[in-house]
Image (cartoon, rainbow, N blue to C red):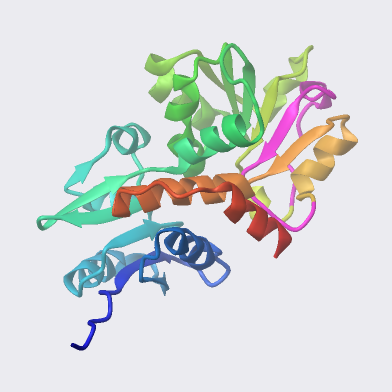
């Protein structure tokens, strides 16, 4: 009797641009852990074509979509149903279809928190955290960070009003403040954790802020990733920090959350992070 080939499971990343993405490799390595016949594509789609591209993907048998810039807000608006963490973030990075309804999640914050706590051993509860940037990436991560019970989360941004508004949106979840970079000049003691999430990471620039915010004991984390130190991590090292990490682990951990959202199985992540770092 002729054996039938397993049905191919089709997932993809949609955004613009996407050619640089490591997501196909990450999800292929996840799928190999369960012997799943996964195909993972990159869909380079500009803003006006986003909704139609999503509908076409699922209409032709697609299983799950990851969503990256600049479409996370559009994905939130398009969804019929959201998880609690996606609703809190007001942005979406993962989509699936369930009985004709588009279900959405945001796995960024969970991925960041897991990388910090499980992979780097950072204790977030009762800590003082400084986040640089007030864009969509920060909005997606604030809820899960505040759920860990930090003593303070301060959001600093070039446009102080934007940071203050973002802080106001999340004050119900914990002690969070917004300010401009200039307001950090009054800082007299270092933070326990500094997270970089500004668009300057895309161009290799470093937001200039008070070096007293960083000390040897500060854990400095860049959501962006590169071979070797990013510009932000080099700045922190020069400021005296000795504990640093780029966002490779967050990339893999948020992908694992998406994989479980689609397939109902949680992949092991340590070996995948190691593979990316050694590639």
Residue placed most toward the observer, 156 or 45: 45
Whether residue 132 is visible to the viewer of this picture, yes or no, is: no
Measured along the vertical axis of the image, is residue 178 above or below residue 196?
above
Q: Position of residue 224 (x, y in %)?
A: 64, 49
124 or 222, which lies in front?
124
On screen, residue 246 versus residue 271, left or right, reads: right
**Residue drawn at (25%, 70%) of the image:** 57
Q: Residue pushed farthest bottom? A: 2
Q: Would residue 221 be seen by someone viewing this image from the given angle?
A: yes
Where are the magenta residues, as a range? 205-228
Q: Is residue 244 left or right of residue 142?
A: right
In the displayed image of the protein, which residue is found farthest to the left? 99
- The verdict on residue 182 being magenta is no
Q: Quadrant of the C terminus?
A: bottom right
Residue 262 lies, in percent from the top left, at 30, 54
Q: Is residue 191 above or below residue 229?
A: above
Judge whether 35 appears above or below 259 on screen: below
Q: Quadrant of residue 174?
A: top left
């Amino acid at each position: 009797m002729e054996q039938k080939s397993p049905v191919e499971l089709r997932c993809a990343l949609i955004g613009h641009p996407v050619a640089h993405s490591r997501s196909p490799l990450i999800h292929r390595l996840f799928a190999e852990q369960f012997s799943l016949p996964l195909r993972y594509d990159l869909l380079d789609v500009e803003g006006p074509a986003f909704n139609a591209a999503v509908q076409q993907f699922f209409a032709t048998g697609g299983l799950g979509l990851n969503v990256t810039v600049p479409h996370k807000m559009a994905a939130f608006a398009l969804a019929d149903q959201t998880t609690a963490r996606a609703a809190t973030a007001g942005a979406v990075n993962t989509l699936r279809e369930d009985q004709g309804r588009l279900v959405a999640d945001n796995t960024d914050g969970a991925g960041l928190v897991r990388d910090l706590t499980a992979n780097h051993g950072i204790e977030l509860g009762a800590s003082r955290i400084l986040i640089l940037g007030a864009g969509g990436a920060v909005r997606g991560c604030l809820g899960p960070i505040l759920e860990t019970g930090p003593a303070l989360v301060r959001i600093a941004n070039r446009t102080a009003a934007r940071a203050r508004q973002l802080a106001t949106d999340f004050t119900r979840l914990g002690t969070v403040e917004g300010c401009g970079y200039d307001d950090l000049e009054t800082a007299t003691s270092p933070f326990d954790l500094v997270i970089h999430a500004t668009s300057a990471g895309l161009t290799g620039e470093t937001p200039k802020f008070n070096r007293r915010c960083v000390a040897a004991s500060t854990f400095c984390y860049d959501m962006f990733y590169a071979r070797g130190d990013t510009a932000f991590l080099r700045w922190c090292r020069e400021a005296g920090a000795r504990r640093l990490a780029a966002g490779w682990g967050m990339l893999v951990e948020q992908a694992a959350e998406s994989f479980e959202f689609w397939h109902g199985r949680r992949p092991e992540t340590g070996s995948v992070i190691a593979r990316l770092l050694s590639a």
